[in-house]
Image (tube, rainbow, N blue to C red):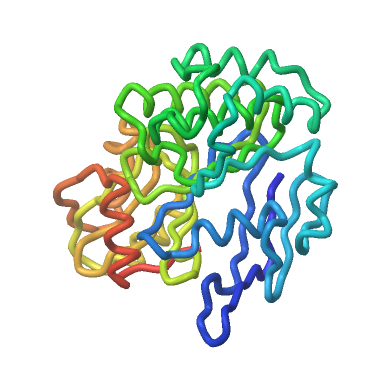
Protein backbone atom coordinates (compact mmCIF):
# COMPACT_ATOMS: atom_id res chain seq x y z
CA UNK A 1 0.00 0.00 0.00
CA UNK A 2 1.10 3.56 -0.71
CA UNK A 3 -0.10 6.33 1.61
CA UNK A 4 0.49 10.06 1.81
CA UNK A 5 -0.59 12.17 4.75
CA UNK A 6 -0.55 15.97 4.53
CA UNK A 7 2.27 15.77 2.00
CA UNK A 8 3.41 19.34 1.28
CA UNK A 9 6.31 20.91 -0.59
CA UNK A 10 7.02 24.65 -0.62
CA UNK A 11 9.70 26.63 -2.43
CA UNK A 12 9.70 29.93 -0.60
CA UNK A 13 6.17 31.27 -0.98
CA UNK A 14 5.34 28.94 -3.84
CA UNK A 15 3.42 25.81 -2.79
CA UNK A 16 4.20 23.03 -5.28
CA UNK A 17 2.18 20.36 -3.42
CA UNK A 18 -0.45 21.33 -0.88
CA UNK A 19 -1.46 18.94 1.94
CA UNK A 20 -1.91 15.88 -0.23
CA UNK A 21 -3.66 12.86 1.28
CA UNK A 22 -3.52 9.71 -0.82
CA UNK A 23 -4.12 5.97 -0.63
CA UNK A 24 -3.17 3.48 -3.34
CA UNK A 25 -4.10 -0.11 -2.56
CA UNK A 26 -1.94 -3.12 -3.38
CA UNK A 27 -2.17 -4.24 -7.00
CA UNK A 28 -3.57 -0.97 -8.34
CA UNK A 29 -2.38 1.00 -11.34
CA UNK A 30 -2.85 4.56 -10.13
CA UNK A 31 -2.54 7.51 -12.49
CA UNK A 32 -1.66 11.07 -11.49
CA UNK A 33 -3.31 13.26 -14.11
CA UNK A 34 -2.69 16.99 -14.36
CA UNK A 35 -1.50 19.85 -16.49
CA UNK A 36 2.21 20.54 -16.81
CA UNK A 37 3.40 22.08 -13.55
CA UNK A 38 0.54 20.61 -11.49
CA UNK A 39 2.95 18.97 -9.02
CA UNK A 40 2.99 15.37 -10.31
CA UNK A 41 6.77 14.97 -10.44
CA UNK A 42 7.17 16.60 -7.04
CA UNK A 43 4.74 14.11 -5.50
CA UNK A 44 6.55 11.11 -7.01
CA UNK A 45 9.94 12.36 -5.82
CA UNK A 46 8.61 12.79 -2.29
CA UNK A 47 6.99 9.35 -2.33
CA UNK A 48 10.29 7.65 -3.10
CA UNK A 49 12.34 9.81 -0.72
CA UNK A 50 14.35 11.79 -3.26
CA UNK A 51 12.79 15.05 -2.10
CA UNK A 52 12.15 16.01 1.51
CA UNK A 53 8.58 17.24 2.13
CA UNK A 54 8.10 20.57 3.86
CA UNK A 55 5.35 18.90 5.90
CA UNK A 56 3.65 15.53 6.09
CA UNK A 57 5.03 12.12 5.19
CA UNK A 58 4.47 9.12 2.93
CA UNK A 59 4.43 5.39 3.49
CA UNK A 60 5.32 2.67 1.00
CA UNK A 61 4.70 -0.82 2.29
CA UNK A 62 6.01 -0.83 5.85
CA UNK A 63 8.48 2.01 5.27
CA UNK A 64 7.67 5.53 6.47
CA UNK A 65 9.20 8.06 4.06
CA UNK A 66 10.15 11.52 5.32
CA UNK A 67 13.07 12.28 3.03
CA UNK A 68 16.38 11.07 1.56
CA UNK A 69 17.39 9.40 4.84
CA UNK A 70 14.78 6.72 4.10
CA UNK A 71 15.73 5.89 0.51
CA UNK A 72 18.03 3.00 1.48
CA UNK A 73 15.05 1.21 3.07
CA UNK A 74 13.09 1.57 -0.18
CA UNK A 75 15.72 0.07 -2.49
CA UNK A 76 14.44 -3.54 -2.12
CA UNK A 77 10.83 -2.41 -2.69
CA UNK A 78 10.71 0.44 -5.19
CA UNK A 79 11.84 1.19 -8.72
CA UNK A 80 11.50 4.79 -9.91
CA UNK A 81 11.75 5.97 -13.51
CA UNK A 82 12.29 9.73 -13.59
CA UNK A 83 11.12 12.04 -16.33
CA UNK A 84 14.68 13.41 -16.44
CA UNK A 85 16.90 11.03 -18.38
CA UNK A 86 20.57 11.03 -17.41
CA UNK A 87 23.02 8.50 -18.77
CA UNK A 88 26.77 8.09 -19.00
CA UNK A 89 26.80 8.90 -22.68
CA UNK A 90 29.73 6.63 -23.56
CA UNK A 91 28.40 3.65 -21.61
CA UNK A 92 26.32 0.99 -23.32
CA UNK A 93 23.05 -0.26 -21.88
CA UNK A 94 24.59 -3.71 -21.45
CA UNK A 95 27.35 -2.29 -19.24
CA UNK A 96 24.91 -0.10 -17.27
CA UNK A 97 22.65 -3.08 -16.62
CA UNK A 98 25.63 -4.99 -15.26
CA UNK A 99 26.56 -2.13 -12.91
CA UNK A 100 23.04 -1.53 -11.63
CA UNK A 101 22.41 -5.27 -11.26
CA UNK A 102 25.42 -5.46 -8.96
CA UNK A 103 24.16 -2.52 -6.89
CA UNK A 104 20.68 -4.05 -6.65
CA UNK A 105 22.00 -7.57 -5.99
CA UNK A 106 20.00 -8.77 -8.97
CA UNK A 107 20.50 -10.63 -12.23
CA UNK A 108 20.68 -8.77 -15.53
CA UNK A 109 18.23 -11.24 -17.09
CA UNK A 110 15.02 -9.24 -16.65
CA UNK A 111 16.56 -5.98 -17.88
CA UNK A 112 18.20 -7.62 -20.88
CA UNK A 113 14.95 -9.40 -21.75
CA UNK A 114 12.92 -6.19 -21.77
CA UNK A 115 15.58 -4.31 -23.76
CA UNK A 116 15.67 -7.02 -26.43
CA UNK A 117 11.87 -7.17 -26.61
CA UNK A 118 11.67 -3.36 -26.89
CA UNK A 119 14.37 -3.22 -29.57
CA UNK A 120 16.92 -1.16 -27.60
CA UNK A 121 20.52 -1.63 -28.89
CA UNK A 122 22.53 -3.12 -26.02
CA UNK A 123 26.00 -2.26 -27.31
CA UNK A 124 25.50 1.27 -28.66
CA UNK A 125 26.65 4.18 -26.45
CA UNK A 126 23.60 5.53 -24.60
CA UNK A 127 24.40 9.05 -25.83
CA UNK A 128 23.62 7.85 -29.34
CA UNK A 129 20.25 6.32 -28.50
CA UNK A 130 17.08 8.13 -29.55
CA UNK A 131 14.95 9.73 -26.78
CA UNK A 132 12.48 6.87 -27.10
CA UNK A 133 15.25 4.28 -26.83
CA UNK A 134 16.65 6.07 -23.79
CA UNK A 135 13.22 5.95 -22.13
CA UNK A 136 13.07 2.20 -22.75
CA UNK A 137 16.62 1.87 -21.41
CA UNK A 138 15.47 3.51 -18.18
CA UNK A 139 12.67 0.97 -17.90
CA UNK A 140 15.09 -1.89 -18.52
CA UNK A 141 17.22 -0.69 -15.59
CA UNK A 142 14.14 -0.30 -13.37
CA UNK A 143 13.11 -3.88 -14.16
CA UNK A 144 16.38 -5.50 -13.07
CA UNK A 145 14.66 -6.49 -9.85
CA UNK A 146 11.03 -7.56 -9.55
CA UNK A 147 9.67 -4.29 -8.14
CA UNK A 148 6.88 -4.47 -5.60
CA UNK A 149 6.19 -0.80 -6.28
CA UNK A 150 6.97 0.94 -9.56
CA UNK A 151 6.79 4.75 -9.84
CA UNK A 152 6.80 6.09 -13.40
CA UNK A 153 7.07 9.79 -14.23
CA UNK A 154 5.64 10.43 -17.72
CA UNK A 155 6.71 6.93 -18.87
CA UNK A 156 5.63 7.31 -22.51
CA UNK A 157 7.21 10.72 -23.15
CA UNK A 158 9.17 10.60 -26.40
CA UNK A 159 7.86 7.17 -27.41
CA UNK A 160 6.31 6.30 -30.75
CA UNK A 161 2.91 4.49 -30.82
CA UNK A 162 4.60 1.07 -30.72
CA UNK A 163 6.63 2.13 -27.68
CA UNK A 164 3.50 3.40 -25.94
CA UNK A 165 1.84 0.02 -26.47
CA UNK A 166 4.91 -1.78 -25.08
CA UNK A 167 4.87 0.35 -21.93
CA UNK A 168 1.14 -0.28 -21.43
CA UNK A 169 1.67 -4.02 -21.82
CA UNK A 170 4.57 -3.89 -19.37
CA UNK A 171 2.50 -2.06 -16.75
CA UNK A 172 -0.33 -4.57 -17.07
CA UNK A 173 2.12 -7.49 -16.79
CA UNK A 174 3.62 -6.02 -13.65
CA UNK A 175 0.20 -5.68 -12.08
CA UNK A 176 -0.55 -9.30 -12.96
CA UNK A 177 2.65 -10.32 -11.19
CA UNK A 178 1.55 -8.46 -8.04
CA UNK A 179 3.19 -5.05 -8.43
CA UNK A 180 1.57 -1.74 -7.53
CA UNK A 181 2.18 0.96 -10.15
CA UNK A 182 1.89 4.74 -9.83
CA UNK A 183 2.39 6.75 -12.99
CA UNK A 184 2.06 10.41 -13.88
CA UNK A 185 0.80 11.80 -17.16
CA UNK A 186 -0.90 14.80 -18.71
CA UNK A 187 -2.42 12.57 -21.42
CA UNK A 188 -5.94 11.48 -20.46
CA UNK A 189 -6.12 8.67 -22.99
CA UNK A 190 -3.00 7.08 -21.57
CA UNK A 191 -4.37 7.11 -18.02
CA UNK A 192 -7.79 5.85 -19.05
CA UNK A 193 -6.27 3.03 -21.11
CA UNK A 194 -4.11 1.47 -18.42
CA UNK A 195 -5.02 2.74 -14.93
CA UNK A 196 -7.54 1.28 -12.48
CA UNK A 197 -7.85 4.54 -10.53
CA UNK A 198 -6.89 8.17 -11.01
CA UNK A 199 -6.05 11.30 -9.04
CA UNK A 200 -6.31 14.72 -10.64
CA UNK A 201 -3.76 17.26 -9.43
CA UNK A 202 -4.33 20.96 -10.04
CA UNK A 203 -2.15 23.74 -8.66
CA UNK A 204 -0.54 21.28 -6.24
CA UNK A 205 -3.80 20.03 -4.74
CA UNK A 206 -5.43 16.65 -5.20
CA UNK A 207 -8.81 17.79 -6.53
CA UNK A 208 -10.24 14.40 -7.38
CA UNK A 209 -9.53 10.74 -6.65
CA UNK A 210 -11.62 7.83 -7.85
CA UNK A 211 -11.70 4.59 -9.75
CA UNK A 212 -11.89 4.48 -13.52
CA UNK A 213 -15.22 2.76 -13.90
CA UNK A 214 -18.42 3.02 -15.93
CA UNK A 215 -19.76 6.48 -15.08
CA UNK A 216 -23.00 7.93 -16.44
CA UNK A 217 -24.84 11.23 -16.23
CA UNK A 218 -28.58 10.74 -15.76
CA UNK A 219 -30.36 13.88 -16.90
CA UNK A 220 -33.38 14.79 -14.80
CA UNK A 221 -35.59 17.62 -13.59
CA UNK A 222 -35.97 18.19 -9.89
CA UNK A 223 -33.75 18.36 -6.84
CA UNK A 224 -30.54 16.71 -8.10
CA UNK A 225 -29.07 16.48 -4.58
CA UNK A 226 -32.16 14.65 -3.36
CA UNK A 227 -31.91 12.29 -6.34
CA UNK A 228 -28.22 11.62 -5.64
CA UNK A 229 -29.04 10.89 -2.02
CA UNK A 230 -31.81 8.46 -3.02
CA UNK A 231 -29.41 6.51 -5.27
CA UNK A 232 -26.71 6.55 -2.58
CA UNK A 233 -29.21 4.84 -0.27
CA UNK A 234 -29.16 1.98 -2.78
CA UNK A 235 -25.40 1.68 -2.34
CA UNK A 236 -24.47 3.47 -5.55
CA UNK A 237 -21.61 5.94 -5.90
CA UNK A 238 -23.26 9.20 -6.98
CA UNK A 239 -22.71 12.93 -7.20
CA UNK A 240 -25.16 15.71 -8.17
CA UNK A 241 -24.39 17.86 -11.21
CA UNK A 242 -26.24 21.12 -10.75
CA UNK A 243 -28.92 21.90 -13.37
CA UNK A 244 -28.09 18.71 -15.29
CA UNK A 245 -28.77 15.60 -13.24
CA UNK A 246 -26.94 12.93 -11.27
CA UNK A 247 -23.64 11.28 -12.03
CA UNK A 248 -23.62 7.60 -11.09
CA UNK A 249 -21.04 4.79 -11.22
CA UNK A 250 -22.77 1.58 -12.33
CA UNK A 251 -22.69 -1.10 -15.04
CA UNK A 252 -24.64 -0.20 -18.16
CA UNK A 253 -27.03 -3.12 -17.64
CA UNK A 254 -28.26 -1.59 -14.35
CA UNK A 255 -29.22 1.78 -15.83
CA UNK A 256 -32.86 0.90 -16.66
CA UNK A 257 -33.47 -0.16 -13.05
CA UNK A 258 -31.78 2.97 -11.73
CA UNK A 259 -33.84 5.20 -14.01
CA UNK A 260 -36.99 3.35 -12.96
CA UNK A 261 -36.17 3.89 -9.29
CA UNK A 262 -35.87 7.64 -9.88
CA UNK A 263 -39.19 7.75 -11.77
CA UNK A 264 -40.91 5.95 -8.88
CA UNK A 265 -39.73 8.76 -6.62
CA UNK A 266 -41.26 11.39 -8.90
CA UNK A 267 -38.22 12.50 -10.91
CA UNK A 268 -38.53 13.16 -14.64
CA UNK A 269 -35.63 11.23 -16.18
CA UNK A 270 -34.12 12.47 -19.44
CA UNK A 271 -31.09 11.49 -21.52
CA UNK A 272 -28.50 9.13 -20.02
CA UNK A 273 -24.94 9.80 -21.24
CA UNK A 274 -21.61 8.06 -20.67
CA UNK A 275 -19.17 10.34 -18.79
CA UNK A 276 -15.53 9.90 -19.77
CA UNK A 277 -12.42 10.94 -17.90
CA UNK A 278 -11.98 13.99 -20.12
CA UNK A 279 -15.23 15.49 -18.84
CA UNK A 280 -14.30 14.81 -15.21
CA UNK A 281 -10.89 16.40 -15.80
CA UNK A 282 -12.40 19.45 -17.49
CA UNK A 283 -14.84 20.01 -14.65
CA UNK A 284 -12.15 19.64 -11.98
CA UNK A 285 -9.53 21.82 -13.67
CA UNK A 286 -12.20 24.34 -14.61
CA UNK A 287 -13.06 24.72 -10.94
CA UNK A 288 -16.61 23.42 -11.33
CA UNK A 289 -16.10 20.34 -9.21
CA UNK A 290 -13.94 19.19 -6.33
CA UNK A 291 -14.31 15.68 -4.96
CA UNK A 292 -12.34 13.54 -2.53
Relative placement, left or right, of 281 versus 55 is left
Label total for image? 0
The residue located at (41%, 39%) in the rendering is 213
- Percent position (x, y) of residue 271? 15, 48
- Percent position (x, y) of residue 252? 31, 33
In the displayed image of the protein, which residue is found farthest to the bottom?
A: 13
In the displayed image of the protein, which residue is found farthest to the left?
A: 271
> Considering depth in this image, is 139 or 54 the residue closer to the camera?
139
Q: Is residue 160 above or below residue 150?
A: above
- Percent position (x, y) of residue 13? 53, 87
The residue located at (49%, 69%) in the rendering is 205
The residue located at (47%, 48%) in the rendering is 184
| Residue 286 seen from this side | yes
Image-quadrant location for residue 34 = bottom left
Q: Is residue 266 above or below residue 119?
A: below
- Percent position (x, y) of residue 96? 65, 28
| Residue 175 seen from this side | no
If the image is split into quadrants, where does the N terminus sit?
top right
Relative placement, left or right, of 193 versus 269 is right
The residue located at (19%, 52%) in the rendering is 269
Image-quadrant location for residue 212 = top left
Q: Is residue 267 above or below residue 17?
A: above
Amino acid sequence: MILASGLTRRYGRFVAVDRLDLRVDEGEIFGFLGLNGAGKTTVLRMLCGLLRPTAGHAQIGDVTVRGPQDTAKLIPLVSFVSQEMRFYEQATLRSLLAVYATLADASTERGLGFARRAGVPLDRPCGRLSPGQQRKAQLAIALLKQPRYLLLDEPTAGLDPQGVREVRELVRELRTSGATVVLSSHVMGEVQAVCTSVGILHHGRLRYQGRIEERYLIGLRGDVRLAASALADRGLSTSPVEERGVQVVAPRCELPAIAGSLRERGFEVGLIERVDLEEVFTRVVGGQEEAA
